[in-house]
Amino acid sequence: MQGLIKSKTQTNYFTMLENDNNMPPTLDDSLNSPDFRTLGEVTVPRPIMKTKNVNVFYGEKQAIYNASLDIGKNEVLAMIGPSGCGKSTFLRCLNRMNDTIDICRIEGEITLEGEDIYGRNMDVVLLRARVGMVFQKPNPFPKSIYDNVAYGINLHGLTNSKSETDDVVEDALKRAGLWAEVSDRLNQPGTGLSGGQQQRLCIARAIAISPEVILMDEPCSALDPIATAKIEELIDELSQMYSICIVTHSMQQAARVSQRTAYFHLGKLIEVGSTDLIFTNPGHRLTEGYITGRFG
Amino acid sequence: MIECSSALHSILYPNRAFTKPPIAKFSLSVRSQPLAGFPGWSLTTGMAFLGALFGCFIAVPIMLFAALGISRRNRVVTRHIERFIRWFLIACSCLAILTTIGIVMSVLFESIRFFRIIPIPDFLFGLEWSPQTAIREDQVGSSGAFGAVPLFAGTFLITVIAMVVAVPLGLMSAIYLSEYAGRRIRTIGKPLLEILAGIPTVVYGFFAALTVAPFIRNNLGFLGMDVSSESALAAGLVMGIMILPFVSSLSDDVINAVPQSIRDGSYGLGATHSETIRRIVLPAALPGIVGSILLAVSRAIGETMIVVMAAGLAANLTANPFESVTTVTVQIVTLLIGDQEFDSPKTLAAFALGLVLFIMTLVLNVIALRVVRKYKEQYE
Ligand SMILES: Nc1ncnc2c1ncn2[C@@H]1O[C@H](COP(=O)(O)OP(=O)(O)OP(=O)(O)O)[C@@H](O)[C@H]1O
Ligand SMILES: [Mg+2]
């Protein structure tokens, strides 16, 4: 607990805020105090993933402080917060992508359907097949468009024949809203697509293996409004079968697609609640400041 | 490499090359002096390099000091100095280019002289190599045979053996170093491997001749195989070790250049470490790996010392690695040892061999660089 924010600049930042807004000091003091608690309902009745008291460190530097958050079945959970607040870090804990970073250390408990994902019996490979991910930056493989989507399918042997694979690939590309643009050039390299197309290719790649949870890190940051609308439609559709956790910088998008919203600030999970509530009646001053565009 | 050592040599012994009478005598250790050693060209070459050397090590520091001291105060002087520096640098690079052209030309002209005596097809496709022309006209067998096929076959055989050693070992150690080894092992292991490239080839040569060749002969002799004391195998194995760092170090670099983000993409889809390496990293790095292998091949083809000491001089046309073979480079050396008239076919043959060798390695290098460059474009 002694690792909580102590740096001078940050302390000043909060004092400044306090003075500027003439707010009662009760709310944000709790941020620095040892018994800081996330505002709102962190648990849900039907969780698919649960995180409890998660701390993440990059070397000496702590990136997430004591975050507890549930992801409900068939729920779209939006994570918002200023740049660098740890949204991606938190997301990457959920399918152990942080394992690939040497200096990253994770404390706390994260479960998928009651199973500890950092436990001894958890097979990371299976975990990542069940908890898929779309990365912040599009990262297609230097392979053909077809092979990009078929990669995960072949990896896990999900289909029995080439024609079956073809169908799954086509279906995934259609759902990601990319089929019309690439159906006549499936053999061309995925790296040759535009940024937005690449991102949709990565989404197609992720949904082709039908994960139970899909983690999306700003999936629409490189997309135009039309493609964004398509992806949001897709998210709606996917949420009937899967659970989705989406990081976004667009408040409108969070409001449009999600049922619950979590607000992160400097590595702390400040507030969680139903999206309607967060956007109409935020409980924490920092949340309010962020969604009304005062900072962040 | 070849240009470099001959150039260095012409710096160290500038007058040796052009005070020589037409009868050339070369020592074994000077492996590529003959390329630069022809009177006319080597004069310019030697002078050029002396000039360049002087310029680089003496004039430039002095000039920069002067420039630093004076220039900022006086605009006109500044401009002159800037212009001078520019011309000086242009001159330096021109010298380097001219030298290369000079070397190529000297080899080319001597080769043409050779091909006037021995027709090109006889040289390129002849199956027999026995350049022992008689010194006196009245001796028997004075004509000699200049079919280069056995030499290129020997070169090819040894290169193949070397690659069979170097490619798998180099690639595996590159994969280990870049993908599995921790940072500590990596920082120690990679330089250690690269030290292999810094061992003088003559050391490899006596290692091959005194350790590996007897070992092969003694151990495989038991198996009833007829192993000659000098074998392609010994030379090839040791040469494989020598070029291993070329493969491993360059491959390690290209494997590291594969962006972490696409590995993450693979892990994110539930691929294991080795699946990611096999299906994503290696295919993505393949052009670069091929490039590194081609560079290693051209290094192996040009290698001389090891084969001189371990592979023998007999121009056997064979695919049997236990027999002794000879290579192009070895023959170039032997052709130029001993007293021969400079324009005898025997001496001139060395230039023809050098020319073909040069063209081969040049083509390989160009292909390798192309391949590597093409790979680089992919991520930028
Ligand atoms: N690989 C890493 N090594 C060291 N520190 C890191 C690493 N990745 C992230 N961090 C640090 O952790 C903190 C949280 O980073 P994170 O990427 O999770 O932010 P974010 O909320 O996703 O920001 P953005 O909205 O800009 O993507 C930042 O201070 C960042 O500097
Ligand atoms: Mg992020």
Image: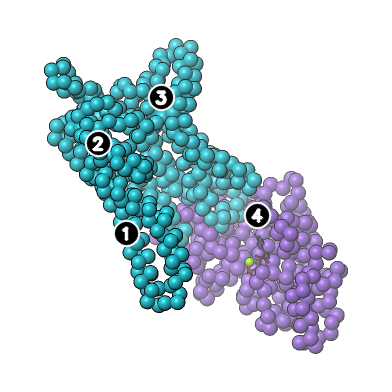
Residue B20 numbered tag: 2
- SS label for mark 2: loop
Q: Chain of mark 1?
A: B
Q: Earlier in the sequence, mark 3 or mark 2?
A: 2
Asked if the residues shown at circle 3 and circle 1 are in contact, with their CB atoms under 8 angstroms apart, the answer is: no
Between residue A210 and residue B362, name the one nearer to us: B362
Q: Is residue A260 visible?
A: no
Is the residue at mark 4 in contact range of ligand 1, meaning its CB lies under 8 Å from it? yes
Corner quadrant of residue A3:
bottom right
Amino acid type, callout 3: Ala
Identify the residue position indicated by label 4 in the image: A101
Q: Chain of mark 2?
A: B
Q: Colour of chain A?
A: purple
Q: Position of residue B280 (x, y in %)?
A: 52, 49
Q: Chain of mark 3?
A: B
- SS label for mark 1: helix
Q: Position of residue A83 (x, y in %)?
A: 65, 71
Residues at marks 4 and 3, common chain?
no
In this rendering, would A24 be left or right of B202? Answer: right
Image quarter (top left, top right, bottom left or bottom right) of the N terminus of chain B: top left
Residues at marks 4 and 1, common chain?
no
Residue B91 numbered tag: 1
- SS label for mark 3: helix
- SS label for mark 4: loop
B345 is higher (above) or lower (below) than B96? above
Q: What whole-number distance in Å separates the C-alpha atoms at marks 4 and 1? A: 50 Å
Identify the residue position indicated by label 3 in the image: B310
Q: Which chain is cyan?
A: B
Amino acid type, callout 4: Ile
Q: Chain of mark 4?
A: A
